[in-house]
Image: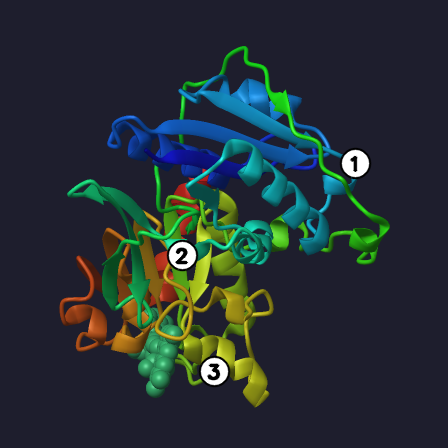
Amino acid sequence: METLLVLAATEADGSLARPALEALGAARTLAASLPGSTLVVGLFGAETDGAVGRIGRAGAGRILAARHPDLAVSRYATDSLAAEALARAAGATLVLAPGTSRMNRCLPGVAARLKGRADTHVTGLGVIDGAVTANRWYYRQRMEGVLTRSHRPWFLLVDPGSQTAAEGIEGPASAETVSVEIPESARRTTVVGVREPAVDAQTIRPDAALLLVAGAGWTKKQADGQTHVPEAEQLILGFLRATRASLGSSKSLVDLGGEGQAVLSFLSHLNQIGQTGSTPRHRKGLSTCCHGEEPHTVGWRFVAERRAISLDPNCGWARGKADVLYVADAFRVMALVNNLLGSQGG
Ligand SMILES: Cc1cc2nc3c(=O)[nH]c(=O)nc-3n(C[C@H](O)[C@H](O)[C@H](O)COP(=O)(O)OP(=O)(O)OC[C@H]3O[C@@H](n4cnc5c(N)ncnc54)[C@H](O)[C@@H]3O)c2cc1C
């Protein structure tokens, strides 16, 4: 009989972020496939009341909460103490948690303390012949593996964006308090603040329905023999402002900065999609001024609807990588698209 613990840290305002609700959604589905299993929710943070109300009972037999002012910030020493206390209090055999940087940092250590095992980047959960299975991708998302473990406790960190979030579960609920002793030695790391880009400069939006990819063509000499980088910046930013799309890039474009060439100022390697970049999960993607080579398009594996704008009718997108290829000048197409978006109010 499995005891499933969904473990999550609350946000600064006491709420629960979407990755935690996705882990809860996955745990509820898994618990329903495991006869006799028990679902427990474990929350920690400076404040947990808002999160408890957000999930209601969520089909959980117990809700456990560890509250402490020192748990307001992400810090290995304090987070691992809270996670360990909650896992022990639940008697968990399976621990599901969102694969956020905060949980990825502390849970493998907690698994070691509890003599358990941990797997990260889990993208699917299931039951085969009564055994719990976890899916994850290997070799830069080229091969998918399905694994199972008999060892318990088994910690599974679920990739954000890979599961359906638990919805419609709000309601009155109360939590059992789990006390956490935080010694002075656990406070040696001090979090002095959070640095993040201004909202407008934040171009990576995992929750967006659409991914816009910019390729190196935006910085290349155009038909008039000149480059038009400032215009390219305006077109791309105008489209992002109107659509709230997420911005991806080819490797060639983000590498140009290191080679001292003209670049789009808001791009960094974090925007890079592909074999040596990221593999986002947006529903739709639009590639612009990018050649669509295999090392790039491998990062589009999970993008369901793909379109591309390139001057080259023989580019990779034309060879089965895109659903629709517009053989056209992206400067002109995007200017027209932005005008249309403007006239429709975004
Ligand atoms: C080991 C390895 C790993 C790699 N990993 C990655 C990776 O993770 N991600 C990645 O992206 N690449 C990766 N690459 C590089 C990849 O092979 C390509 O070199 C890169 O994707 C090319 O980028 P690009 O298409 O933007 O540039 P280019 O190849 O220079 O293509 C520019 C395109 O823009 C078009 N264009 C120019 N002007 C316009 C216009 N006005 N309108 C429309 N189209 C226009 C051109 O026709 C051309 O097709 C990797 C390579 C290797 C060897």
Nearest the viewer among 98 and 203 is 98
Camera-near label (3 vs 1) is: 1
Using the rendered view, name the quadrant where residue 299 is placed.
Answer: bottom left
Instruction: Say if 14 sits above or below 107 in the image.
Output: above
The mark that comes first in sequence, 2 or 1, is 1
Badge 1: residue crowd in 10 Å (few <14, some 14–19, many ≥20): few
For the residues labelled 3 and 1, say whether their Cβ atoms are less than 8 Å apart: no
Secondary structure of residue under mark 3 = loop
Q: Give the residue at mark 3.
A: 226
Q: Quadrant of ligand 1?
A: bottom left
Nearest the viewer among 92 and 221 is 92
* Residue type beneath disc 3: Gln
Instruction: Say if 57 sits above or below 5 in the image.
Output: above
| Residue at the spot 33% in from the left edge and 29% down from the top edge | 37
Q: Is residue 61 left or right of residue 43?
A: left
Q: Picture coordinates of residue 209 (x, y %)?
A: 37, 44
